[in-house]
Image: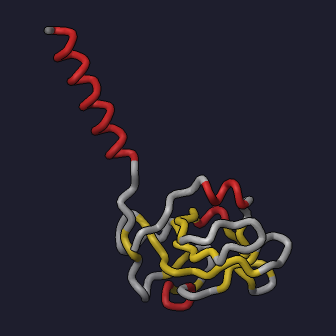
Amino acid sequence: MAFRLFAASLLASIAATSAIAQPAWVEIGSRVTVPAFSAIVDDVDDWDVYSVDGQEIGEVEEVLGPDARTPTALAIDFEGNAGFVDRDIIVPLDRFALEQNRLVLRASPSEVEAMERHRD
């Protein structure tokens, strides 16, 4: 009996920890600056996204973060070409670079597929 109570308590503790570890995404306000791109959210929304080889692979749907003023990720609507999945995926800002006025994703299709799916 004591073991069952211990096991149940342990499982509840693990479940609570898992729930805490997952970020709760918030859409960033339209006038907030995205420091990584020196642009406001309103401007970043709908930017085209390119692969490192220059192929257009999707577009920015939303700028996301842990609160309405801290951008940390982009929800990208991938078009299903160049090996990338055809769905909306949340990609951390540090996986992007601005190159020749283009938003370039520095992640492989398999890396993107392992990232969190965006459900708006």
Residue at coordinates 35% horizontally, 68% vertically from top-left?
A: 67
Vertical position of residue 76 compared to residue 19: above or below = below
| Quarter of image, res 93 | bottom right
- Which of the 4 image quadrants contains residue 80? bottom right
Q: Is residue 57 visible?
A: yes
Percent from the top left, x then y, of residue 76?
A: 57, 74
View extreme (right): residue: 53
Q: Nearer the viewer, residue 109 or 39?
A: 109
Compared to residue 38, the image places residue 14 above or below, namely above
Of all residues, the one furthest to the left in this rendering is 1
Colour theme: secondary structure
Can residue 74 be spotted in the picture? no
Q: Quadrant of the N terminus?
A: top left
Q: Nearer the viewer, residue 81 or 25?
A: 81
Residue 4 in the image: x percent, y percent? 20, 14
Vertically, is 11 above or below 80?
above
The residue furthest bottom is 43
Quadrant location of the C terminus in the rendered image: bottom left
Q: Residue 104, position in %: x, y?
A: 73, 74
Count of numbered circles in the view: 0
Residue found 75% across the figure and 81% down from its top: 56
Would residue 8 be found to the left or right of residue 82 on screen?
left
Q: Is residue 42 left or right of residue 3?
A: right
Report x, y in % for residue 47.
Answer: 62, 86
Q: Residue at x 55, y 90 (%)?
A: 43
Residue at image location 30% in from the left, 37% down from the top: 15
